[in-house]
Amino acid sequence: MQNPFDQELQDRLVRYAAIDSQSDETAPGSPSTACQFDMLHLLRDELTEMGAQDVELTDYGVVLATIPGTAPGPTVGFLAHVDTAPQFNASGVKPRVISGYNGGDITFPDDPALVLSPAEHPYLAEKIGHDLITASGTTLLGADDKAGVAIVMTMARHLLNSPDIARGPIRVAFTPDEEIGRGVSERLPKDLRADFAYTLDGGQVGEIEYESFSADRAVVTVTGVSIHPGWAKDKMVNAIHLASKIVQTLPQATMTPETTADREGFIHATDMEGGSSEMVIKFILRDFERDGLAAKGELLRQVCAAVQAGEPRAAIKCEIYPQYRNMRYWLEKDMTPVDLARAAAKAEGIEPISVPIRGGTDGSRLTEMGVPTPNVFTGMQCIHGPLEWISVQDMATATRTCLRLAQMAAKG
């Protein structure tokens, strides 16, 4: 069943998803990739054309704008990120719309062997009659987080065209590099000028999230002793062997992403590259509690130290860098933004769901930096891979919830 937002949301997501904007952890700068400017420039221009105020693209790659208030109330921010995940091909995305989903298996034109089945994805089985958007089979879709972008833009346009809707000032922000943990500049909290905010970066309808992982990244550099292999006896130290020993010594049956769920954290080796003279292993460390995160970092250091002790001619360096912390630590001190989002969902006939995010959002960093920012659903599913899909009607429900939230904030 169509509602006033369905077509706009569909058109926006199809258009935005076709624009390459993948981030790159190995690249410096903000944004990390030039292609993200294609999205940022477009959004800046669209916000200007629709009549938003204070529209700017900052030198650190964030689009900001104001939707003027029509009633007293706090300034509420709504954010989404323009970059897509680097874990899977995101170039040449060909979005397609499946109108009135019939409940069966979904196949993909560019990879006939790929199947999205409601038997394996129960949430899909609930979407009979919905209009779904997927990619073509060889790329991700990028609904993470261009669905959030489409929702915020649709909401902004509606509010600008509806001065009769009582709401306080609204600040809109579109960030780069969220997928690589670099979306929130130190300057963003001040420039956002919001009392509290929401990221539109969640999954199924009803998700109002205020807990995320705490996260660090680690880089282990193993330097061996290089010599011609013909004269290597008792002299060569092969960095590949030592790097492999580090990975194998770490827990395999526990404490990895594929063996953990719910509130369990993990140590995840994401990249290993180099050669016999030097190897670099990259890890991400995740836990919901600070103590658990620190323990995982210490375990990694201990393993590196043990391998180093077994081969003193090598040099093994383990460097750990903070990324973000569980936003619950700050939000639980004042749950007003969370309670407001839950109330808005209920007013739309939706039962709120609050489960810990086994990941992070820009809201994790913003909350830590002083702007309380829980996460709100968009409907995105199977993200970061070729099966990614979303319901247009779920996006419309998110849009209505955000509009309700803006009105309730002004009353509250």
Image (cartoon, rainbow, N blue to C red):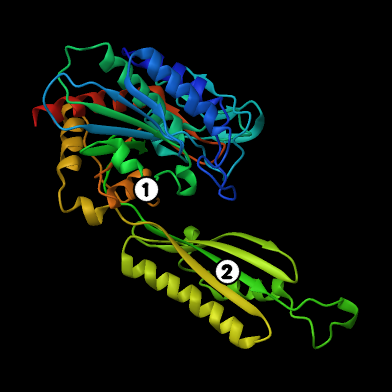
Q: Is 155 situated above or below 341?
A: above
Q: Is residue 151 left or right of residue 99?
A: left
Residue at the spot 66% in from the left edge and 76% down from the top edge: 242
Report the residue at 38% width, 19% height from top.
47
Residue 407 visible in the current orientation: yes
Could you tell whether 314 is left or right of 46 in the image?
right
Quick one: label 1 or label 2, which is nearer the N terminus? 1
Q: Depth check: 165 or 45 in front?
A: 45
Q: Amino acid at mark 2?
A: Val
Quarter occupied by residue 204: top left
- Mark carried by residue 199: none
Residue at position x 70%, y 69% in the image: 278
* Quadrant of the rendered image containing residue 185: top left
Which numbered dot is residue 186?
A: 1
Q: Amino acid at mark 1?
A: Glu
Q: Nearer the viewer, mark 1 or mark 2?
A: 1
The number of discs equals 2
Task: Tell me the distance, in whole angstroms, between the alpha carbons under discs 1 and 2.
Answer: 27 Å
Residue extending furthest left?
A: 412
* Contact flag, marks 1 and 2 (Cβ < 8 Å): no
Residue at the image point whose x is 46% and y is 36% from the top: 61
Percent of width and height locating residue 315: 64, 78
Residue 73 percent coordinates (x, y): 13, 29
Secondary element at image label 1: loop
